[in-house]
Amino acid sequence: MGTYRDLDAWKEARVLCKMVYRITELFPDSERFGLSSQMQRAAVSILSNIAEGYGREGAKKYIRFLHISCGSAYELETQIIICNDLGYLDKEQATKLYEKNTVVIKLLRGFIRSLMKRQGVSLREPVEEYGGNTGHLFR
């Protein structure tokens, strides 16, 4: 294994982070310190926690930081939905962000499962497919 920068999850999260920054630049000025800032922090948190976990001692701590990263991705997912509901994102923008975020979540969950299996740690939750049809989410 190389560094955290070689992980597909980190690479995809980096693309997602750039997407979030570019799209939130178009939000109304009134959201500069609201949803825009919150989404940017969540996107940065995904990347940062992958990196921070890598720098920690031991797989258990790394897994913990990967779970935090995954939590930030779920937080961003909700913010994408809210922004679409409020009209800050159109259906196409929301779908693109949501789909990229779903890729990141799937990669993180797969990596977490892999590390847990290597450590002989049992999974706390059943492994199910994540994501799916966004048709009902965005208007």
Image (cartoon, rainbow, N blue to C red):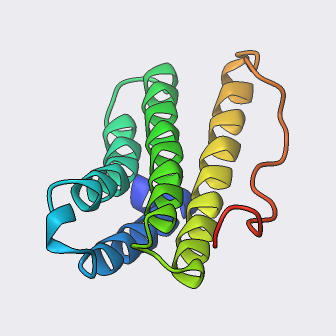
Q: Is residue 119 left or right of residue 126?
A: left
Count of labels shown?
0
The answer to whether residue 109 is seen in the rendering is yes
Return the x and y of residue 88 as percentages of the image width and height: 39, 73
The answer to whether residue 3 is seen in the rendering is no
Q: Is residue 104 left or right of residue 46?
A: right
- Residue positioned 27% across, 82% down in the render: 26
- Residue positioned 71% across, 35% down in the render: 113
Residue 50 appears in which quarter of the rendering?
top left
In the rendered image of this protein, does residue 105 appear above or below residue 72? below
28 or 39: nearer the eye?
A: 28
Residue 61 appears in which quarter of the rendering?
top left
In the rendered image of this protein, does residue 32 appear above or below residue 29? above
In the rendered image of this protein, does residue 70 appear above or below residue 33? above
Q: Is residue 72 left or right of residue 119?
A: left
- Residue positioned 44% across, 23% down in the render: 58
Q: Is residue 114 left or right of residue 127?
A: left
- Residue positioned 64% across, 62% down in the render: 103
Residue 24 appears in which quarter of the rendering?
bottom left
Return the x and y of residue 75 as percentages of the image width and height: 46, 44
Quarter of the image with the C terminus is bottom right
In the rendered image of this protein, does residue 93 appear above or below residue 102? below
Return the x and y of residue 17 as percentages of the image width and height: 37, 67
Return the x and y of residue 134 as percentages of the image width and height: 73, 66
78 or 43: nearer the eye?
A: 78
